[in-house]
Amino acid sequence: MVARWSIPGAGAALAVHPSGWTAVAVPSLGDVIILSDTGSVTRTLHVGGRPGGVAVVTELVAVLDPAETSLTVFDTTTGARKEGLRAGDGAVAVTSDGTGRFLVIDARDGELLAFETGPLILRQRFPVPGSPYAAAYDQTRNTLWVAVTERNEVVGYNLTGGTPREVARHPTPRLPIAVAVDPSTGAVVVAGSAEGLVQRISP
């Protein structure tokens, strides 16, 4: 079954909560819209700026503003704004892992930034050479996949230890700008912008 829901503007990023609701960033309005699993708007977060990335942990949503290279957390149950921090010098993507952390890709500095919640604190900076641009987390295998544009690669990092540990590296189509993971199989899907190609990497 396919369902389509209208939102009051062009969505730039989204994140789905395990319970079924979806957070959608709408940069033109400076809003993040929370949709139920049936598509009804349950809350609109007026976050300001131009939200370009969202990630969810429990009932929290982290909103990334690439123009301000900032990360701000909101409580989706109350709509309250919580903590906000600068996220490097060129943050472009945010995702979450299975331990309650928000993971941010800083393309300008070539770093992975790990933020803990309650309160929001930057706990770790880890170098990712080659202009990282997008990321997706495989919670089943505790692996973060990062698309690296200058090297035309996707790199897998295991995050179960104190420091990210590289566990895989694969060539991709040129200029990989998006990555996703199939949690049931561990397959990694990468989109390359230079040639209009999508690549699926099976484990």
Image (tube, rainbow, N blue to C red):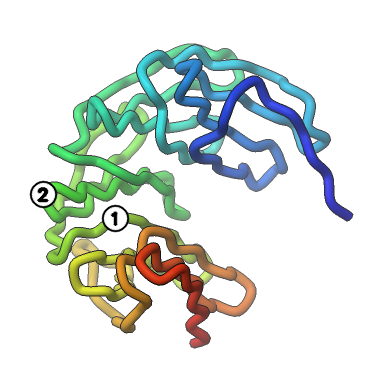
Q: Is residue 3 above or below residue 27?
A: below
The answer to whether any part of residue 10 appears in the image is yes
Give the alpha-carbon distance from disc 2 to disc 1, as whole Å.
Answer: 11 Å
| Dot 1 amino acid type | Tyr
Taking the image as shown, residue 146 lies to the left or right of residue 126, namely right
Residue 186 locus on image (x, y percent): 53, 77
How many marks do you count on the picture? Answer: 2
- The dot on residue 133 is 1
Q: Quadrant of residue 72?
A: top left
Q: What element carries label 1?
A: strand
Task: Decide which of 56, 151 is in the foreground and name it.
Answer: 151
Residue 47 locus on image (x, y percent): 44, 16
Q: Residue at x 46, y 68 (%)?
A: 196
- The dot on residue 170 is none
Report which residue position mark 2 lands on.
Answer: 109
Residues marked 2 and 1 touching at CB (< 8 Å): no
Residue 155 locus on image (x, y percent): 30, 73
Quadrant into which the N terminus falls: bottom right
Q: In which quarter of the image is residue 86?
A: top left
Task: Decide which of 87, 68 is in the foreground and name it.
Answer: 68
Q: Residue at x 37, y 44 (%)?
A: 94
In this view, which residue lies farthest toward the right? Answer: 1
Taking the image as shown, residue 57 lies to the left or right of residue 8, namely left
| Dot 2 amino acid type | Asp
Q: Name which of mark 2 and mark 1 comes first in the sequence.
A: 2
